[in-house]
Image: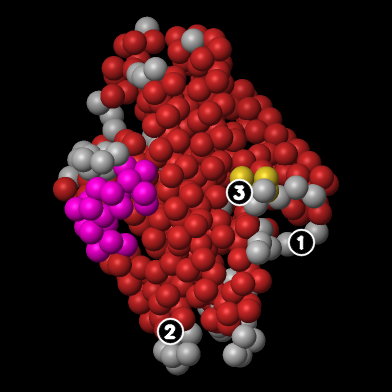
């Protein structure tokens, strides 16, 4: 199949991929809401909820790897259709503008809410000022945007240097070689695990977490194979079909593996940390196949609901954390069952984010700042899909 034909064939296959991205975005709300009940200091103290903790641990094993795989898929398709300079400029607006506004506007608000629940009594302001002096704390969920921009920039540099057709063909050959046998798949999975483990270990030994508190180097190392996986699949429609045909026994096995990985995540011993990071890209890829298979079978075509959620995904991403923190400050003193509080947190944050979305789409100036959306244009699902936490 020619490069151009491959691009045309993939263009008609976006509805359920968009739905996957929307589902992953919505999963971020219960994931972050569960932190309130895990005793993490930046959300505030509360009694631990085993169910909420289990939800967060399980979702964490695959949500970000799947997100970066979907983002890599969208990015490769987009860069193949546009001039590199145009695409890079659009990426900067789409990702870096919301990052800057999120860090400068929402970051201080989120830290104020943290200071109210974690600082000493009567010293909220001083505690807040101390938190503001640590740039990495302002980033919160927005770390994803700079990491994704870095991946896109590297992809753009490759296309600029070697040309779109050559990059597309090279990634297609990687997909063809890997998919030729299960042994090759296992080999590539092992290489991905070694790359992630080595990158994680290098950042730990070097004592580097972030660059100026703004680019999370460790996360960039961990999720690079997932982004590359998505870019490879974008070049081969047959691979897209293969990764969405996960059998029931395989799906069960991957879910068990994800549960085991979630149980391993809090273990602090060095061998456990090395094993955990080696397994992240493998389990993440497996669970991505499971999720894509389920959604493609159950929600194969476009619908008003899934289309709306896909368009609103960036708004949910940007605002859900500040809404969760605000609701948590209200609910922490309340003696409700954890399950009830958790449901209120998740439902309230999603509903609040959708209300904000309706406001933003009617105010182009604010949509440009918070969503990176060009004035006069409503969010397109594919553009949104190229950049989220």
Which secondary structure lies at badge 3? Answer: loop
Left or right, 221 with respect to 249, comes to: right
Q: Which is closer to the viewer, label 3 or label 1?
A: 3
Residue at x 61%, y 61% (from the top left corner) = 137
Which secondary structure lies at badge 1? Answer: loop
Q: Which residue is mark 3?
A: 214
Left or right, 260 with respect to 358, comes to: right
Residue 298 is labelled as: none
Q: Which residue is mark 2?
A: 331
107 vs 201: above or below: below
Say whether residue 83 is magenta: no
Mark toward the start of the polypeptide (3 vs 1)? 3
Residue at x 80%, y 59% (from the top left corner) = 269
Left or right, 238 with respect to 96, comes to: left
Residue at x 53%, y 28% (from the top left corner) = 153
Q: Which residues are magenta?
A: 353-373
Which secondary structure lies at badge 2? Answer: helix
Q: Which residue is mark 1?
A: 268
């Amino acid at each position: 199949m020619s490069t151009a034909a491959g691009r045309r064939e993939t263009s008609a296959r976006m509805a359920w991929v968009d739905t996957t991205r929307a589902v992953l975005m919505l999963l971020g709300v219960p994931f972050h809401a569960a932190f309130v009940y895990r005793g993490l200091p930046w959300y505030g103290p509360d009694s631990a909820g085993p169910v909420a903790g289990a939800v967060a641990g399980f979702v964490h094993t695959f949500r970000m790897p799947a997100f970066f795989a979907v983002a890599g898929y969208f990015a490769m398709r987009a860069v193949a259709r546009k001039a590199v300079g145009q695409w890079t400029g659009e990426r900067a607006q789409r990702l870096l503008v919301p990052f800057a506004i999120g860090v400068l506007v929402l970051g201080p608000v989120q830290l104020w809410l943290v200071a109210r629940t974690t600082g000493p009594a009567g010293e909220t302001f001083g505690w807040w000022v101390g938190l503001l002096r640590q740039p990495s704390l302002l980033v919160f969920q927005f770390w994803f945007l700079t990491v994704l921009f870095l991946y896109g920039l590297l992809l753009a540099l490759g296309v600029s240097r070697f040309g779109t057709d050559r990059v597309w063909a090279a990634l297609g050959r990687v997909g063809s070689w890997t998919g030729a046998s299960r042994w090759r798949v296992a080999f590539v999975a092992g290489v991905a695990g070694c790359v992630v483990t080595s990158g994680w270990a290098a950042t730990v030994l070097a004592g580097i977490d972030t660059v100026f508190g703004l680019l999370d180097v460790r996360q960039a190392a961990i999720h690079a194979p997932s982004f590359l996986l998505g870019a490879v699949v974008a070049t081969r429609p047959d691979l897209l079909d293969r990764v969405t045909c996960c059998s029931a026994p395989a799906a069960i096995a991957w879910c068990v593996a994800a549960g085991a990985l979630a149980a391993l995540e809090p273990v602090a011993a060095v061998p456990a940390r090395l094993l955990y990071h080696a397994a992240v890209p493998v389990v993440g890829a497996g669970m991505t196949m499971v999720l894509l298979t389920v959604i493609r079978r159950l929600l194969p075509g476009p619908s008003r609901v899934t289309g709306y959620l896909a368009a609103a995904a960036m708004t949910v991403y940007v605002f859900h954390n500040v809404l969760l923190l605000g609701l948590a400050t209200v609910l922490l003193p309340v003696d409700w069952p954890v399950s009830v509080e958790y449901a209120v947190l998740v439902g309230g944050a999603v509903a609040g984010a959708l209300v904000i979305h309706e406001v933003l789409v009617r105010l182009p100036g604010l949509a440009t700042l918070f969503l990176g959306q060009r004035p006069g244009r409503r969010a397109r699902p594919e553009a949104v899909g190229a950049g989220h936490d």
